Image (cartoon, rainbow, N blue to C red):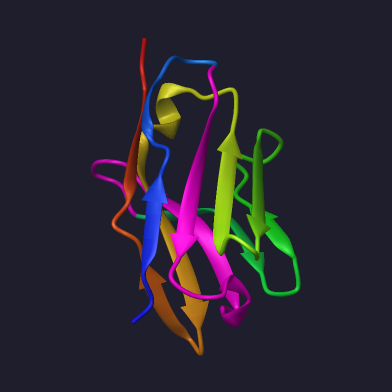
Amino acid sequence: QVQLVESGGGLVQPGGSLTLSCAASENIFNFNIMGWYRQAPGKERELVASINVGGTIRYSDSVKGRSLIYRDGAKNTVWLQMSSLSPEDTALYYCDAQILRVNYWGQGTQVTVSS
């Protein structure tokens, strides 16, 4: 059973930055794609950023230019670095990994942007 463990969330002031990490229980290159999603109260879950096994990266328009997704195969970890945070970035952030069209999710890490 694949396990994904997120960490790095917390309370951040507007304009601040943070880095979320997602540690996988197995080799991350076994997954076709890994990504970060977020879900704010009353809203649908949305893709924030993703990276596929070949290294192709996608960002949502809402975070493009101020976010970076990267990985380390030796640590089986994917990170999401975000800057210039605003209250609109407040959400529960989830790590997702897809293999053979099956999605695995972490438990989520809360990010709250507030002064």
Residue 82 x, y percent position in the rendering: 58, 34
Residue 38 drawn at (x, y percent): 40, 49
Give the residue drawn at x 57%, y 56%. 78
Residue at the extreme bottom of the image, as rendered: 100
> Which of 27/98 is in front?
27
Quadrant of the rendered structure where residue 45 is? bottom left
In this picture, which residue range is highlighted in magenta?
16-44
Q: Is residue 49 highlighted in magenta?
A: no
Residue at 75% of width from left, 73% of height from top? Answer: 54
- Residue found at x 47% / y 59%: 23
Q: Residue 47's spot in the image, x, y percent?
A: 50, 56
Q: Is residue 104 left or right of residue 21?
A: left
Q: Is residue 19 magenta?
A: yes
- Quick one: quadrant of the N terminus? bottom left
Asked which quadrant contains residue 96, the reply is bottom left
Q: Is residue 100 above or below residue 97?
A: below
- In the rendered view, would you say 83 is above or below 95? above
